[in-house]
Image: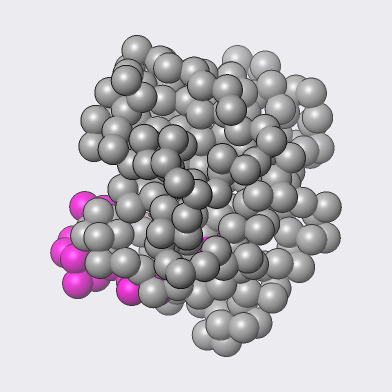
Amino acid sequence: MKIYCAKDYEQASRITANILAAQIILKPDCVLGLATGSTPIGAYENLIKRYEAGDLDFSSVHSINLDEYRGLTPSNSQSYRYFMNTHLFDHVNIDKKNTFVPDGLEEDKEKACQDYDEIIRSHGGIDLQLLGLGHNGHIGFNEPGDSFAKTTHCVTLAESTVAANARFFASASEVPKEAYTMGIQSIMQAKKILVMVCGKDKKKIVQKAFYGSITPQVPASVLQLHPDVILVGDEAALM
Ligand code: GLP
């Protein structure tokens, strides 16, 4: 695992954007696995700046997002589709037809998951997967459990996740209780994984996930088995 310890969130965002930009420059038709949450917002802002400066071209990039709340429409401001559009896709020359987020409105859970796995498969997998880290070690919405879920599945969100994500909603009761998420196997099959973690509230889980035992109780711990992981964080999270 390569570790880049930045002095603060702004620098960590620039480093994360550098790595994403390098991937796009080296392979213009790459498949990016993208993440939501507050952590990657600064990296996306940096990518937009580089695009505006004429240094990045997203026209052949494909993106496959990690997860989506079940039951939210793409136009709901809390949906992850809306997040991706407003924080990145609307500001760069990516073709939205080449951007994928699980279909939160598909009521048939099995179909929603199979369709998404087919999207991942038909793209030949993911070149670079960006990940944030939940306080309980979740990646995407793969919550702690007794085993690692391999493929796309519907999860019941942990109470702590609902509580953590309530800050984006009017109240905790409005946070959807279920989500579709890419599975651990699909994440682990990405050629390269880029984890961004910032803030002192993530320090404990960083220790557990990257230096503790590998267990489905800490889903991110499985990343220790991946041959090409880059961890970018600020001093508060990493030191
Ligand atoms: C959500 C997302 C995750 C993200 C996590 C951490 O639960 N599904 O993909 O990594 O939040 O979010 P934040 O970056 O806001 O701490």
179 w.r.t. 216: above or below: below
70 w.r.t. 140: above or below: below
Image quarter in which the C terminus is found:
top left
Instruction: Point out the residue furthest to the left here.
Output: 171
Q: Position of residue 171 (x, y in %)?
A: 16, 64
Q: Position of residue 158 (x, y in %)?
A: 31, 67
Residue sitting nearer the eye, 186 or 100 = 186
Looking at the image, which residue is at 65% across and 41% down? 226
Q: Position of residue 89 (x, y in %)?
A: 57, 43
Residue 199 lies in the magenta-colored region? no
98 w.r.t. 173: above or below: above
> How many numbered marks does the figure carry?
0
Q: How is the image coloured?
A: one colour
Looking at the image, which residue is at 28% across and 56% down? 165
Asked whether the viewer can see residue 86, the reply is no
Residue 192 sits in which quadrant? top right
Classify residue 115 as left or right of residue 123.
Answer: left
Asked whether the viewer can see residue 16, the reply is yes
Classify residue 102 as left or right of residue 198.
Answer: right
Q: Which residues are magenta?
A: 167-182
221 w.r.t. 171: above or below: above
Classify residue 1 as left or right of residue 208.
Answer: right
Residue 235 sits in which quadrant? top left
Looking at the image, which residue is at 51% across and 35% down? 195
Q: Position of residue 19 (x, y in %)?
A: 61, 23
Image quarter in which the N terminus is found:
top right
Residue sitting nearer the eye, 154 or 94 = 154
Instruction: Point out the residue furthest to the bottom here.
Output: 108
Looking at the image, which residue is at 70% across and 45% down? 190
